Amino acid sequence: MSTTTLKITRDGIVLAPAAVTPAGDNFRNTGREFLVVKNDSGSDVAVSLKIQQEVDGVLPAPRSVTVSDGDIVFIGPFPTDEYNNDDGCLEVTYDSSTDVFIAWFRLMTEV
């Protein structure tokens, strides 16, 4: 896992994104998480989310989300049967890693 899972509760949480890993990141996914991507690179960045579930015997292309320069984008949640690898993680890659930052959040369902 590349970064710590931050838990959102009623007490709130500060967005403190970390630099992406140039080779990509893996995140433990329970289906209640989402990815926050902050792009300060000067150009658009494509974030690719690997789909793990085959359709008719074919593995689909990764889902791609474009994050424009200067934007902060929230992506997710991710159904575990479609996105999790054998280790229970979501695999994410980026077409650029310079000045691109991420945070991985879990929405807590406590009452």
Image: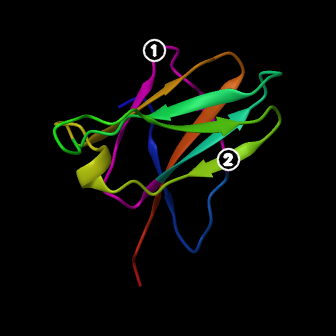
Q: Is residue 9 left or right of residue 37?
A: left
Residue for point 79% across, 23% down: 43
Name the residue that disc number 1 marks. Answer: 23
Residue for point 69% across, 37% down: 67
**On-image quarter of the C terminus:** bottom left
Crowd around label 1: few <14 · some 14–19 · many ≥20 (10 Å): few
**On-image quarter of the N terminus:** top left
Instruction: Give the magenta range.
Output: 15-33
Where residue 46 appears, as percent x and y from the top left, is 61, 29
Circles 1 and 2, Cβ within 8 Å, touching? The answer is: no
Where residue 52 appears, as percent x and y from the top left, is 26, 39
Residue for point 68% across, 15% down: 98
The image quadrant of residue 33 is bottom left
Name the residue that disc number 2 marks. Answer: 73
Q: Amino acid at mark 2?
A: Val
Q: Is residue 45 above or below residue 22?
A: below
